[in-house]
Amino acid sequence: MSALCARGRSGFSGCSRVLCAQLSTPPHQEQQAGTECGTTPVNLSAPEKVDNRAQLWSRYHEMKKLVYDLLPPGVCNLLNPATICANNEISLGEIEIYGFDYDYTLAQYSDMLHKKIFTTARDILIQQYKYPEGIRNYDYIPDFAIRGLHYDIEKNLLMKVDAFHYIQLGTAYRGLKPVPDEEVLDLYGGTPHIPLIEMSDFYGKVTIGPTMKQFMDIFSLPEMTLISCVTDFFISNGIDFDPVHLYKDTTDAIRDVHVKGMMYDWIEKDMEHYILHGEEVFAVLNRLVKHNKKLFLITNSPFSFVDKGMKHMVGKKWRDLFDVIIVRADKPAFFTDRRKPFRRLDESGSLQWDKINSLEKGKIYKQGNLFDFLRLTGWRGSRVLYFGDHLYSDLADLMLRHGWRTGAIVPELENEIRIINTEQYMHSLTWQQAVTGLLEQMQTYQDAESKQVLMEWMKERQELRSVTKNLFNPQFGSIFRTYHNPTYFSRRLIRFSDIYMASISSLLNYDINFTFYPRRTPLQHEAPLWMDQLCTGCMKTPFLDEMVHIR
């Protein structure tokens, strides 16, 4: 509906008044309203039989014309894919210290890395875990899974869950095939709701026994795909298996790719193809330093890997830009465990034994913990802004326990905005909302013919919801929304980040002292204000009298 902003007040207000009137006055009240106004003579004879079916369809076609009149050609492309979105008001002018994660924050990687991780872990399963050779026939499917999905380990189900712990029906997969809604409901006791006790812990990890795992890391995309491919092979070939064993073996194989340094070797040998947007990283860091901002880096990656990557993106003197550099930090334990002290690395990367009483510019430190970091630097509270891609491991503790400001890097945002900007999405979503409004207003019609009409509208609404879902991903849809609710991922994104963006380079689009003001998102009881709020920034003058009853 935000596309309506582009019309401006002159082109929109008249339509909004008509649309408001159409939605707010049910058909059975129209003749009464005319009579009360004195425009129609009172008919004392027996009332004629009202054709409710014809009236409902008449209202439907009037609404369709109005909606499409409000969305003329060229109304799309309203959103900038490089925008920074604000969950909380934050002024960059008040930020003195900027902190960064490395992987998928400073260093963005191409999709070919996911294919390499998948292929290598698949071969580990075959060679080391003795899985069937036939699994080698499966290649990486880049558009199969999305980030933020939940995996029920015992039930062997990969699915999308909304902010209220409800499974989005139609998005539950066992292997590479969807599971019928009836079977999903049967598996969870007749409801699509997942009880809190069955969900993963605060960091999305499995804690006590087989339960629900949430995949929040961008690196988890090949892991989800591998689990699904192996499951598909076993089911297709009638091979009995324990999904708990499959999950553990697959995650162990994926872990080996990281722990044994294979991924680091691939990237170091071919940075031109694996690392994206390096020149933009230099521009961001250099700009912050020129404005006298303090910079620090906290990453779980090893120094040799980070050093080569930063030299590729920023230059040989990249360390001069940072006031503190910490590698192998072991996040999220870095933020909660006080026991691990900092250790200094020499120029060759060897550990030193001296006690750390200060964190010096240009030096490299390993492990440590946030509490010593705060004590040694004095960098506390809302003057610190830290960027990371993992909502749990990078951002949650910093915001909730320490009051830092946080920025989430969500690479998927760029593509999702491009899809939102398409005419197909805009028209589908707007008409879907209009049909929903019709269903809500006309549900008082309970005769048999009217119920049939409403059922047809319900079917069309479901088809429209599927269309908008499939534009993002045919299996799971958008990472930010189920059909209408925010996803579980979105809920965490809003909770743990002040701002979010597709890339750190988005900072270059804003003044160094820019203040981000989040739009006032209407609550359901504020529905009459909805259109005015969506158009904030496009039409500065509120006209609340014209917005009543708009959904």
Image (cartoon, grey):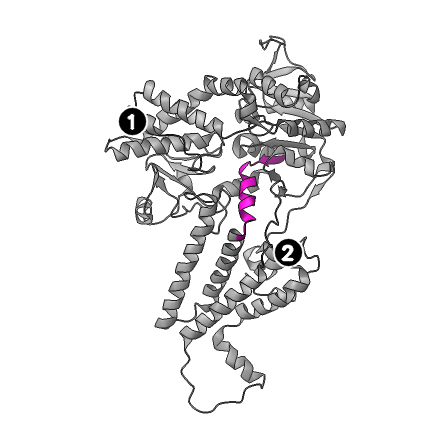
- Tell me the SS state at disc 1: helix
Q: Which residue is mark 1?
A: 134
- Label drawn at residue 156: none
User: Where does the image place residue 243, in percent across and percent down from the top left?
Assistant: 31, 32
* The magenta segment: 405-423
Relative height, residue 52 to residue 11 (above, below): below
Mark 1 is surrounded, within 10 Å at the Cα level, by few (under 14), some (14 to 19) or many (20 or more) other residues, namely few
- Is residue 108 one of those drawn in magenta? no
Q: Which residue is mark 2?
A: 6
Report the residue at 42% width, 44% height from top: 474
Specify the quadrant that holds the C terminus.
bottom right
User: Where does the image place residue 240, in percent across and percent down from the top left?
Assistant: 24, 31
User: Where does the image place residue 38, in percent across and percent down from the top left?
Assistant: 58, 86
Q: Given the image, on which type of amino acid does mark 2 rest? A: Ala
Q: Given the image, on which type of amino acid does mark 1 rest? A: Gly
Report the residue at 42% width, 30% height from top: 223
Whether residue 270 is visible here, answered yes or no, is yes
